[in-house]
Image (tube, rainbow, N blue to C red):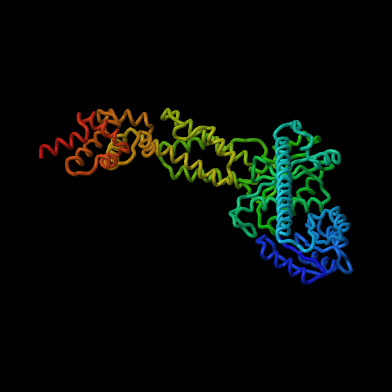
Amino acid sequence: MKLLILDDEPILRQGIINKLKMSGLPIDIVGEAGDGKAGLELVQREAPDIVITDIRMPGMDGIAFIEQAQRMNEQLGFIVVSGYSDFEYAKRAIRLGVSDYLLKPVDDDQLKECLSKIINKIEKGRMSNDEMIRLRNETDLSRETLRKQYMTKMLQQADHPDLSAAVRNEQLSRIENKYRKYLAVVLVLEPIQLPHYSFRQGDESLIWFAIENVLSERMESSGRDGVLFQHILHEHEMVYLLGIESSSEGLVIQAWLKEVLDGLQNYLKLQVTIAIGTTVDDIGQIQQSYKQAKQAIRNKMIYGTGQIYDYESLQKRSGERGILLTDEDESKLFYWLSEYNAVALQNWIEFRIRSLAHSPSATYMQLEWLCVDLYLLFRKYLLANTGVTEWIIGEMDDLLYWLQNLSIWQDAVNQMQNIADNIVGYLSQNNPSSNKDLMEEVKYYMEMNYDKSITLQSISERFYIHPNYFSRRFKERYAQSFVDYLTGIRMKKAMDWLRETDIKIQDIANRVGFEDASYFSNVFRKYYGVTPKQHREQIQSNS
């Protein structure tokens, strides 16, 4: 605590200073003065927490000093030092909110007690202020979160969400009363790796604050009005609900948003992709405009990020679905699959998707349709030739979910090429002419890797063969199941370790692919009729 001493008698000031130094209290004496005027200068310069002041001083007395000092700092604490004849002054000082007063000569214990009380009071006050600030900040954050929840819910349902009117944003009500039409603008912040430019690790909220500032400044300078908020479910998305006079303002709005894009890129080095929905006549229909903007922004997978996508313009040039794959394409695809020609398939897939992506009229929907058509052709071939599909190429729902989260068209090339590779691998491994060699290859693999975790599933994945088909073919070939064959290999190896070494049974179990020594002992007993321990004892007794 910073403390100031005022008394016109230097000896008394020094006496108080000495007492304070011996008190052990957390006090820092920042100054002393002999009159009220000099004291006010120190209050302004040093910003003390506590002032010990005499009442009777030349020039400005203690009462006048306290009155003016309180105007400078309402939180300032005062202790008045007075004589018996100053009692009426002391009463006035108490009315001014002085914490306490002491009679001259000042007693050490009384001074320490008074200061302890005022220090405790100030600290509690600070804690109270800090708590109020914290609660106010939490309230502001909670209110802002509720506002985001309200606006997000509004985008998800056609009618206004049933939330408290207190949460309803003032700006929203204002643009409802001010404008006749409305539209939604979606801004997506493209991924960045922190630290980035002037942003450091943990500055995510600061980044959004900076983006909102740029948008607000541009909005104000253009004379526009709207509601801006970060989508509470999509952390990289900001939504701007804009009020407009007529649907013909589209080009003006795009020009204004281009300034926003350039500003974010030039000043913050942030890349943002923007999409615009169509206008609606009622703010309660804004969900429709928002959905259109979300659809429009997905075209960045074809045309790239850092651009503005207008739903209405894209709809005009997209046209009908059309025929994306012809009968000739199907014939080529089936031929290459029958020949296990993975290279030709990969080249063809890349050519088809690249050609579509480079078409001036292409849309994200056409890219999705092409991928779905390819999937259906793969499925058709597999059903006709193997009877199995999803195990090899995955479920249709998985593909659709993946397409919903596609970033760039090149990812579509990679995904469809991977599916083609899986099919070719499966078909080549299940070719009847190669089944004999495949069984031998699997058998050799088990003999070389019996110490590892080997399951029917891991074998099927490694050799691109359906587990049921493999299990049946293996038993036909070797007159025993895959599991029995693997167990036989492991038991023979375990027997060798028991006979030729003194390694612990737990370690032997691990060396032949068993993590649990008890389970290993049970399997060994079923196979040989004795436990590993009993067998080792027999060997030792016979030697």
Give above or below for 456 relative to 200: above
Q: Name the image quarter holding residue 177.
A: top right
Q: Residue at x 67, y 60 (%)?
A: 26
Q: In the image as oriented, which residue stretches furthest toward the bottom?
A: 10
In front of the other: 173 or 331: 173
The C terminus: image quadrant: top left
Judge whether 133 appears above or below 17 on screen: above
**What residue is at 66 percent from the left and 55 percent from the top?**
270
- From the top left corner, tell me how far across and down residue 482 is, in percent: 30, 32
Query: In which quadrant of the rendered view does residue 51 lie?
Result: bottom right
The reply to whether residue 261 is in sight is: no
Q: Is residue 482 left or right of residue 541?
A: right
Residue 113: give x, y in percent of width and height.
Answer: 71, 56
Q: In front: 66, or 442?
A: 66
Question: 133 or 91, which lies in front?
Answer: 91
Quadrant for the N terminus in the image: bottom right
Q: Which residue is painted at 83% across and 58% down in the image?
A: 70
* Residue 187 in view here: yes
In the image, what residue occupies the spot 81% across and 35% down? Answer: 281
Please indicate whether residue 431 sits to the left or right of residue 228 in the image: left
